[in-house]
Image (cartoon, rainbow, N blue to C red):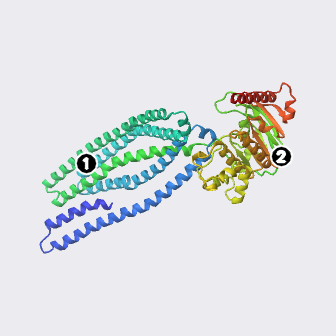
Amino acid sequence: MIDIFVPLATGWLLDAVVETDSGQRMDQIWRELAVFLLLVVLFICCRNSLTLITNRISAKAMMELAKQSFAKIQRLSSDWHANTFSGSTVRKLTRGMWAFNAATETLAFGIFPAVLVSVGIVAVFAYNWLILGVLVFVGIALFTACSILLAVKWVAPANAAAQEVDSQVSGLISDAISASSIVKSFAAEEREDRHLADLVERWRAGAMKAWDRNAYTSLIQAAILIILQAGLLAGGIWLWSRGMASAGDIVMIVATQALFNGYLRDIGLHVRNLQRALSEMQDLVDLERAIPEITDLPDAQPIVVERGHIKFENVTFRYRGNAAPLYKNFSCEIQPGEKVGLVGASGAGKSTFVKLIQRMYDPESGRILIDGQDISSSTQSSLRSIIGHVPQDAILFHRSLRENIAYGRPDAAHNEIIAAAHQAHAHAFIEKLEAGYDTVVGERGLKLSGGERQRVAIARAILSQRPILILDEATSSLDSISERYIRDAIETIAKGRTTIIIAHRLSTVKSLDRILVFDRGVIVESGSHAELLQLKHGYYRQLLKNQEDSTDQRELAVQ
């Protein structure tokens, strides 16, 4: 609003120079000059104060956006993460944060000031010369309506399409870099280069389309402004010729048209920037609206587990998109402290069994109980905090070995970390590293071999000291000697814990209390290793025979 009075003060100063008597001229000139300078100083002070305020608001809001979006992403389902490029998700999150900053600056320094200046200029002109007030009002209304319509209906779709491809580019790059070892092993660098080149070409075409539409919009806005300026200046000269405006008024009109020309010219840019920022923020809005498939009930309570008794009661479960359920009225019971192996062909339901225990999925019907408590009525965080899990593909953070091992118990003492590493037979290779337990393992632990990563994951499970332990192909990445060491470690850490081991190497489950043999979502056999071998035509016995034959064939091939 201060800016509106600067042209008025300019006109007053000129009238003081031209019209004031010689005896009073200098006092009035100095007075008008002081008013002019005061307005300029006030404008600068207010604008810089606004900058300091918005800096703090934007920084805090961006921080909250990052925290809130990251928390939401962490709590979305396993299916959501499996179907989403992590690189694209990161790109959408960071782009949305900065888009919020751009939207805030555009509103605070562009659109709101432009609206206030437009209203003020119309009021000033209407007060002095109604005809000019009407002319300015019509011109500004036409310019604004045209800018908004072009931005929303014409530019926005092109921007949205370009942003979608931009996210795909980020996802492809992240995917290729994270799988760089596979790319190199298949000498596929040029193929990935071509893949990216094709996608980037699509991005270029989309970006050019969006940018060109922005440029054409600017031309249309400039044409409207030129017509408005010409009409305003012509009207001012016409008023001066009829004695209805002074020389100072003409200067004021010229200065005012320059003022609103700047604001309106920029408002076109601001509208486009705001539209682009809102479009980029839409990804965060969509993320916020995403509903986690697995949620805690309003009255969910922390689960309390002392024994580790697991029971499936008539559980029916199907994966999304599958017509038939994997489990139908499935029931099973694992006693406290029992060591149970899950074996069977791929897709038989072994991994689903442990995912349901961890409540990565909810069954369609039936119940899963731990120590008599329905896990669907418990909080997810408390449920997973009582389960130690070693996955088939051990994933480590790009952090030190100490932090990775202590991830389940961040407050663990260094001697406890070392003890866990000893039990997992990881200490020997760790102490040979230059930085020892402070060695940073690289993204997903790629600086370590598969077997080393698996041992660190087992050490992590050992240190967490959970009453229920799940090992999903925990020895699949280990050589036979290391596998024997790990089996010894499992024997040690399984004491007093309910332990579930998924295994394709049947040698891993021979010493367990009980083996559950899965086939297409049904437990077809159950018993110890010795008991199952007594079944002459048993499924387990056939699996063991097939595996021994495969091992013999490999040994003959080596010889």
* Residue 129 point in image, percent of width and height: 23, 54
Residue projecting furthest to the top: 537
* Residue 105 point in image, percent of width and height: 41, 54
Report the mark closest to the observer, 2 or 1: 2
Give the alpha-carbon distance from disc 2 to disc 1, as whole Å. 85 Å
Mark 1 is on which residue type?
Leu
Local crowd size for mark 1, using a 10 Å CA cut-off: few (<14), some (14–19), many (≥20): some
- Could you tell me which quadrant the C terminus lies in? top right
Disc 1 target residue: 135
On the image, which quarter does residue 403 sit in? Answer: bottom right
- Residue 325 visible: no
Residue at image point 42% right, 34% down: 202
- Could you tell me which quadrant the N terminus lies in? bottom left
Horizontal side of residue 194 vs 228, given as left or right: right
Horizontal side of residue 426 vs 265, given as left or right: right
Image disc number at residue 336: 2
